[in-house]
């Protein structure tokens, strides 16, 4: 039935010849025999008689080596989340036992309903609806031809300018607005500014395309599968406007990609995921005395917890919160970030860590500058300048002081990006990106906290004693 060809071949490493002095075949070194069963080689081991063994070794890299091609690190990400939760559980429990529940949600809601003017930041957010109505009303008038493009542009310039200036004046003039409330309100108005700017551009492009099609007698008809989609000016409705306002994107489209249904399991997981101060306080004295050695020590102590807080913020906002909102609205495009953690250049990091802002800058700022003849370097510098302005706007106004630390930090990214791209590659470039994130942010935090302390708290004995 079968043909047997037995050959004694002691297994040896790296193809070395079998030793003639090994003695009996029943030594610790395995001896194999090859038998041909229908021209197929089967290996038998003398140590395990009657069992066929396949080759158990092959040329391969360790899984954590970059050459292995392995990319699934989901378990390590879960481990990091578990470690973050456990590392902060003690502090949470300690504060809960010592101070109890400091914020009662029921009392907060009842207080707001009884006296809404005691919450000026919330009132400021509600007032933002006025600017939404102005933009929608302007677009409807432009679609009907009641006003010219120049008049519409002037209305938009006024509307967008007031969106940036009005909350700034309110925050600066009302001392009852806390820095946290002011930052939240200004963040809402900044997002609204970017959204309405995109809303203006896209509707203007639609009008231009409609005029071109009207002049072209042989324009193709809309296919039947596209008839269910919204077309201009059918998009100029309150429902469409507010869907865009709440959608997790800054770039407007008439027809966003939509998921088929809301996945309740996915929604509940994202909702569940949405559920340093001592080091900063101890930094006041060395900063005030300009003790550079101790200031450096405090900076290094602050770097790690500050970075962990930033990572938690990134995951909670860009992954959990934005996916939660996208699932509620069935918003289909869930690319809110890319693999910025693999950045080998500063430019790659800024292009991939905040995709909604990157898409807005690319669509409404960078490419229009290129179309009017600006060079790439000038366009990139303009994008960083705009980003630096908004960073300073969101920090200095709520704190009611102008120190330009955030602005200078953003503009410093330009020479840093050139240096990293020019002299550092691969892992060294990635390490430089991580170092700029871990060290750069605590420097800005310490500068602002120090200046805020000197400006607002130094003359107050109660606050000074608490710090």
Image: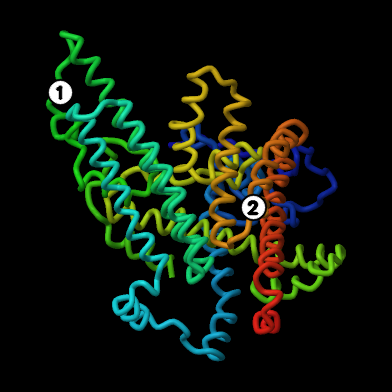
User: Mark 1 and 2 residues: CB-CB less than 8 Å, in contact?
Assistant: no
Report the front residue among 118 and 340.
118
10 Å crowding of disc 1: few (<14), some (14-19), many (20+): few
User: Could you say which quadrant of the image residue 224 lies in?
Assistant: top left
Q: Which residue is mark 2?
A: 46
10 Å crowding of disc 2: few (<14), some (14-19), many (20+): some
Q: Does 3 sit above or below residue 269?
A: above
**Which callout, 1 or 2, points at the residue further toward the start of the chain?**
2
Q: Is residue 457 left or right of residue 171?
A: right
User: Can you give x and y, in whole percent of width and height, for residue 277 in the image?
Assistant: 64, 74
Is residue 109 visible to us here? Answer: yes
Q: Nearer the viewer, mark 1 or mark 2?
A: 1
Residue drawn 42% across the image and 55% down it: 188
Distance from disc 1 to disc 2, alpha carbons, whole Å, reads 73 Å
Q: Which quadrant does the N terminus fall into?
A: top left
User: Can you give x and y, in whole percent of width and height, for residue 334 in the image?
Assistant: 38, 46
Q: Which residue is mark 1?
A: 223
Report the front residue among 99 and 5.
99
Is residue 59 visible to us here? Answer: no
Residue drawn 33% across the image and 73% down it: 116
Q: Which quadrant does the C terminus fall into?
A: bottom right
User: Could you say which quadrant of the image residue 223 lies in?
Assistant: top left
Query: In this figure, what is the number of numbered marks?
Result: 2
User: Could you say which quadrant of the image residue 251 lies in?
Assistant: top left
């Amino acid at each position: 039935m079968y043909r047997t060809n037995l050959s004694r071949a002691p297994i040896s490493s790296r193809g070395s010849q079998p030793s003639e002095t090994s003695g009996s075949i029943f030594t610790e070194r395995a001896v194999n025999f090859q038998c041909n069963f229908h021209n197929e080689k089967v290996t038998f081991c003398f140590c395990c008689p009657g069992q066929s063994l396949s080759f158990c070794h092959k040329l391969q890299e360790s899984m954590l080596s970059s050459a292995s091609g392995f990319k699934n690190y989901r378990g390590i990400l879960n481990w990091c989340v578990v470690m973050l939760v456990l590392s902060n559980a003690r502090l949470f429990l300690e504060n809960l036992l010592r101070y109890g529940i400091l914020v009662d949600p029921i009392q907060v809601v009842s207080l707001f309903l009884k006296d809404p003017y005691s919450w000026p930041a919330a009132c400021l957010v509600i007032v933002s609806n006025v600017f939404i109505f102005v933009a929608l009303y302007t677009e409807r008038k432009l679609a009907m031809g009641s006003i010219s493009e120049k008049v519409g542009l002037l209305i938009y310039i006024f509307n967008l300018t007031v969106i940036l200036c009005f909350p700034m004046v309110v925050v600066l003039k009302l001392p009852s607005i806390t820095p946290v409330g002011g930052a939240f309100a200004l963040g809402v108005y900044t997002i609204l500014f970017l959204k309405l700017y995109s809303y203006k551009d896209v509707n203007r492009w639609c009008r231009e395309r409609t005029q071109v099609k009207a002049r072209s007698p042989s324009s193709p008809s809309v296919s039947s599968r596209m008839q269910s989609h919204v077309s201009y000016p059918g998009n100029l409705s309150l429902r469409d406007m507010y869907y865009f306002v709440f959608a997790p994107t800054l770039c407007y489209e008439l027809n966003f990609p939509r998921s088929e249904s809301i996945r309740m399991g996915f929604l509940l997981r994202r909702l569940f995921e949405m559920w340093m101060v001592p080091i900063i306080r101890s930094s006041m004295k060395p900063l005030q005395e300009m003790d550079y050695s101790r200031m450096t020590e405090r900076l290094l102590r602050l770097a790690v917890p500050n970075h962990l807080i930033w990572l938690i913020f990134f995951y909670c906002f860009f992954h959990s919160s934005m996916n939660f909102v996208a699932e509620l609205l069935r918003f289909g495009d869930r690319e809110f970030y890319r693999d910025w953690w693999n950045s080998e250049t500063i430019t790659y990091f800024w292009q991939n860590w905040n995709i909604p802002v990157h898409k807005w800058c690319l669509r409404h700022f960078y490419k229009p500058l290129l179309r009017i003849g600006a060079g790439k370097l000038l366009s990139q510098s303009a994008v960083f300048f705009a980003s630096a302005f908004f960073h300073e706007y969101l920090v200095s106004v709520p704190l009611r002081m102008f120190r330009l630390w955030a602005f200078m930090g953003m503009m410093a990214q330009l020479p840093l990006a050139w240096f990293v791209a020019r002299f550092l590659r691969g892992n060294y470039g990635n390490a430089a990106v991580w170092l700029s994130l871990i060290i750069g942010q605590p420097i800005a935090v310490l500068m602002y906290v120090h200046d805020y302390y000197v400006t607002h708290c130094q003359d107050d004995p109660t606050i000074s004693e608490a710090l």
